[in-house]
Image (cartoon, grey):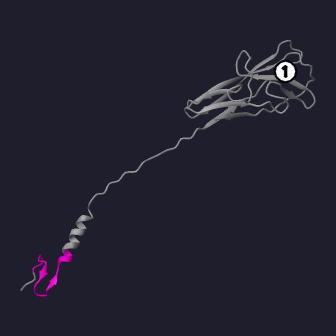
Amino acid sequence: MPFAPFTLINIATKKLYFPLLFLIISFNSLADTFEGSFGVLASVNNNCAIAVGDFIGVYNPLDQSPVLATQTETVVCTIGTVFHIRINQGLHGADVTHRKLSDGVHTINYSIFRDSARTLNWGETDGVDTFDSVGTGTTQTFTAYDFAAALQVVPPGIYEDTLTVSLNF
């Protein structure tokens, strides 16, 4: 009896060809499509940056008027980040209300305020004497108002102080 190529059993050899059919079926099942999904997540942390300028400038001890100067600070924080700008007493000041410039021997008293009327001292206690705000995601500008009283008796020289401006968030 001749071999029939599409029969499952070849009668002459008595061999079963079912496994060949199974393989054909299993190859067809490999063409299926499986779908899945995955999440995408980004974490945004509170973050801030600050840039500050110089204070005071030139002091003339013979001038009848106090030195009134301003200085700009720029801050950028992520949206909704509550922050506090702190300014310490400096190297020569006793505290944030008694700051001093020094030439190493002599001192010039000065103050830094948060308002143009120069009534709100700028210090280090969050919510009390710091500049407090909330980040907008864009650059925000703040002004420090400096004051050095007139007629302080000091010789000519270079008077310096180093302040630490910190951004707490």
Instruction: Give the image quarter of residue 169.
Output: top right
Q: Is residue 39 above or below residue 128?
A: below
Residue 81, horizontal then vertical, whole percent: 58, 33
Look at 9% across and 80% down and name the residue there.
4
The furthest residue to the left:
1
- As drawn, 125 above or below 6: above
Q: Amino acid at mark 1?
A: Tyr
Give the x, y percent position of residue 64: 86, 12
* Residue 11 quadrant: bottom left
Which residue is located at x 11 percent, y 77 percent?
7
Q: Nearer the viewer, residue 156 or 6?
A: 6
> Horizontally, is 53 left or right of 37 in the view?
right
162 on left or right of 37 = right
Magenta stretch? Answer: 4-20
In the shown orientation, is residue 112 left or right of residue 134? right
Does 28 appear above or below 164?
below
x, y percent for residue 139: 60, 30
Side of 83 where 44 appears, left or right:
left
